[in-house]
């Protein structure tokens, strides 16, 4: 008997159940009793989003006015009435970036920057496609002659930076998985190993991402001393992995050491060998906790990634934010806020992705959040 | 305590010293002792406990909560270390747990991520490593059919009701063909209707397999219906065997025949008198 997969089930599985309610609204399937839950699930979040944007708008306007007034007053004090009028006119005109107040951007400005980033991406992609087309024939010839093909070396767009960041975070996550899960299993199984590693975990768990980065930098720099290649990616993904692996390590060890005593008794009575005991009893029963750990690890990895990319000068969202901050152009602040939302939304989606995998592999189907 | 056995068991089955002949004994508990050290000194759960269980015998053990019944059973299973005395199966002392002593636990203790078939196979694969995969599957399916689960081979254990899970537990225990079957209040968590059903299933399989069985129960009627002998334990601490009652109903038994038998209420009164004093 195969269960049918419906949109409702999939969205619920992903923890995106509210999408189902929206669908019901448009297909007219919504019952009257569902009205309250409709209010709660759809109307309230939308209202709170609007309220948030409204407060943000007013806040940014207030900050803008404070800064504008300060600039005018400063001009008045230092250079007199004429200069002050000139500054006021310049601000009102809003074209010259040098006199504009540089503060929290308004929602409209952020939206504008978002669209300009997308336009920029389209231009760069078109440019890149054209470049590839142009060099295709030449590259074929170069490959035939045994030379390296010519690659596009232009500036990466915002979307390219997002994918770079995702690549770094997944590499770091995989590193954390490969180190923390097996180590956690060993620690959970053996009280001796547990006491051997406990100090190590307790001391290194709270260490800041920045310090991890510096440590990895010291080591990787020396290890790759002969290599001409850019080590920033290696350094940043290793740092991300080391920062984020602790939750998985601790959860795996806890899951493995706290397997239901009944299961262990069954394994004892049946005289299961160590291999069978671990793979048939201990691991399956600790999978929910391991996945809780992995979920935390992925969100921590995404969170520290920004700081580490910034330090490592590794291309990605972190570097994008930092460069925009240094840049100080008219719309830099707005672009930083765009990046902030993109980071938040991707973090949320990653979390949902892990939740879906967790629900899929775990044996008790109670909703883990 | 040997005198109580003398009273209840026909004398020709016993040797001169009041014990069963070794060739007939499956499980032998000698001077068994269990001590739990506590900060206030040792707590003696069991002391000087002697019990012989014969081949193909079904023994139920009854006693007040906390008297050490479960401790004794888990010591026989090898899950709880022995503080003094010894336990032997067919004359050799036990060393830790093993599949020669199958256990049906109070909670079904199935792996919830496995199907019922996989749960039974977990034991079967271990006990019959040289059988082909098909043969092992057949053994597991055979016992699942016997407990009435032919339609639920591929259901996850977590999807089964408590009663169904305990059926899988019974199938798992019988499928490894143990020498001794240990049952720790296996039906204690079930409603009385399901309990009756499972008692019938248990006794039906047992009638065919005749595996020596030791079962703990709180239920006087269950103790009489299933057992050849009912062992009554005194209240702890320092619990020992208080009395042994032979149940001489013919096998195979039906519930109706047992309830209508003249001796039934005599046995019942005997057990209840013991438990109330």
Image (cartoon, grey):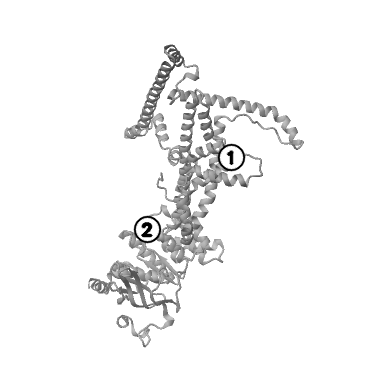
Chain letter, disc 1 residue: A
Task: Find residue A228 and report its image quarter.
Answer: top right
Q: Are marks 1 and 2 on the same chain?
A: no
Label 1: which secondary element: helix
Which residue is tagged 2? B163
**Left or right: B204, with B243 as reference point:** right
Vertical side of A7 occupied by A333: above or below = above
Task: Find residue B199 and report its image quarter.
Answer: bottom left
Judged from this view, the residue extending furthest toward the bottom is B16
Q: How many marks?
A: 2
Task: Find residue B132 and report its image quarter.
Answer: bottom right
Going 65% across and 26% down the picture, which residue do you hit? A130
Chain letter, disc 2 residue: B
Q: Nearer the viewer, residue A228 or B202?
A: A228
Q: Nearer the viewer, residue B97 or A196?
A: A196
**Left or right: B83, with A210 as reference point:** left
Identify the image quadrant of the C terminus of chain A.
top left
Instruction: Point out residue A236 in the picture as x, y percentages from the top left corner.
Output: 55, 41
Going 45% across and 66% down the picture, which residue do you hit? A269
Instruction: Point out residue B171 in the picture as x, y percentages from the top left corner.
Output: 44, 63
Camera-near label (1 vs 2) is 1
Q: Residues within 10 Å of mark 2 (few under 14, many from 20)?
A: some
* Res. A232 mark: 1
Going 41% across and 52% down the picture, which residue do you hit? B159
> Can see residue B118?
no
Q: CA distance from mark 1 to mark 2?
A: 60 Å
């Amino acid at each position: 008997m195969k269960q049918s997969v419906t949109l409702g089930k999939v969205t619920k599985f992903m923890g995106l159940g509210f999408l189902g309610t929206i669908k019901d609204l448009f297909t007219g399937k919504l019952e009257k009793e569902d009205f309250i839950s409709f209010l709660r699930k759809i109307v309230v979040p939308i209202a709170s989003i609007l309220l948030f944007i409204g407060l943000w708008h007013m806040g940014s306007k207030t900050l803008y006015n404070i800064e504008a007034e300060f600039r005018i007053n400063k001009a008045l004090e230092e250079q007199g009435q004429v200069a002050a009028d000139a500054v006021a006119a310049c601000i009102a005109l809003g074209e010259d970036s040098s006199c504009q107040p540089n503060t929290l951007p308004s929602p409209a400005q952020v939206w504008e920057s978002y669209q300009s980033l997308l336009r920029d991406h389209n231009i760069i992609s078109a440019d890149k496609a054209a470049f590839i087309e142009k060099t295709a024939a030449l590259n074929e010839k170069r490959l035939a002659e045994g030379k390296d093909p010519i690659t596009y070396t232009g500036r990466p767009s915002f979307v390219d930076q997002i994918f770079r960041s995702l690549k770094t975070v997944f590499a770091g996550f995989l590193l954390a998985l490969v180190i923390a899960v097996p180590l956690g299993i060993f620690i959970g199984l053996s009280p001796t190993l547990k006491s051997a590693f406990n100090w190590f975990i307790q001391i290194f768990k709270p260490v800041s991402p920045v310090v991890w980065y510096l440590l990895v930098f010291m080591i990787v720099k020396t290890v790759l001393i002969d290599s001409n290649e850019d080590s920033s990616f290696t350094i940043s993904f290793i740092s991300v992995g080391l920062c984020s692996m602790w939750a998985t390590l601790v959860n795996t060890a806890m899951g493995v050491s706290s397997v239901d005593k009944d299961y262990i008794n069954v394994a004892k009575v049946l005289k299961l060998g160590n291999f069978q005991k671990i793979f048939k009893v201990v691991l399956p029963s600790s999978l929910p906790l391991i996945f809780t750990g992995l979920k935390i690890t992925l969100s921590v990895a995404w969170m520290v990634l920004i700081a580490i990319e910034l330090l490592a000068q590794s291309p990605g969202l972190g570097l994008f934010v930092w460069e925009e901050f240094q840049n100080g152009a008219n719309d830099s602040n707005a672009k930083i806020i765009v990046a902030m939302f993109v980071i938040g939304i991707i973090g949320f989606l990653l979390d949902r992705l892990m939740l879906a995998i967790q629900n899929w592999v775990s044996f008790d189907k109670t909703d883990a959040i | 305590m040997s005198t109580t056995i003398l009273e209840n068991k026909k004398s020709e089955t016993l040797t001169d010293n009041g014990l069963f002949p070794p060739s007939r004994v499956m499980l032998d508990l000698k001077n068994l002792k269990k001590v739990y050290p506590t900060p206030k000194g040792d707590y003696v759960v069991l002391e000087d406990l002697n019990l012989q269980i014969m081949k193909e015998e079904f023994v139920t053990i009854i006693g007040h909560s906390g008297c050490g019944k479960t401790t004794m059973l888990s010591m026989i299973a090898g899950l709880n270390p022995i503080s003094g005395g010894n336990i032997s199966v067919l004359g050799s002392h036990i060393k830790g747990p093993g599949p020669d002593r199958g256990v049906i636990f109070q909670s079904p203790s199935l792996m919830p991520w496995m199907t019922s078939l996989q749960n039974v196979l977990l034991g079967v694969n271990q006990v019959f490593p040289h059988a082909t995969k098909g043969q092992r599957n057949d053994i597991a399916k055979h016992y699942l059919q016997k407990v009435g689960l032919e339609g639920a081979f591929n259901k996850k254990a977590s999807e089964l009701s408590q009663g169904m899970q305990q059926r899988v537990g019974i199938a798992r225990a019988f499928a490894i063909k143990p020498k001794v079957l240990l049952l720790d209040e296996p039906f204690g968590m079930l409603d009385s209707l399901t309990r009756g059903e499972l008692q019938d299933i248990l006794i039906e399989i047992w009638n065919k397999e005749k595996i020596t069985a030791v079962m703990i129960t709180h239920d006087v009627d269950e103790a009489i219906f299933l057992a050849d002998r009912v062992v009554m334990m005194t209240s702890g601490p320092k619990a020992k065997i208080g009395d042994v009652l032979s149940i001489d109903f013919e096998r195979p038994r039906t519930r109706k025949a047992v309830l209508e038998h003249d001796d039934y209420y005599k046995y019942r009164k005997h057990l209840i008198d013991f438990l109330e004093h």
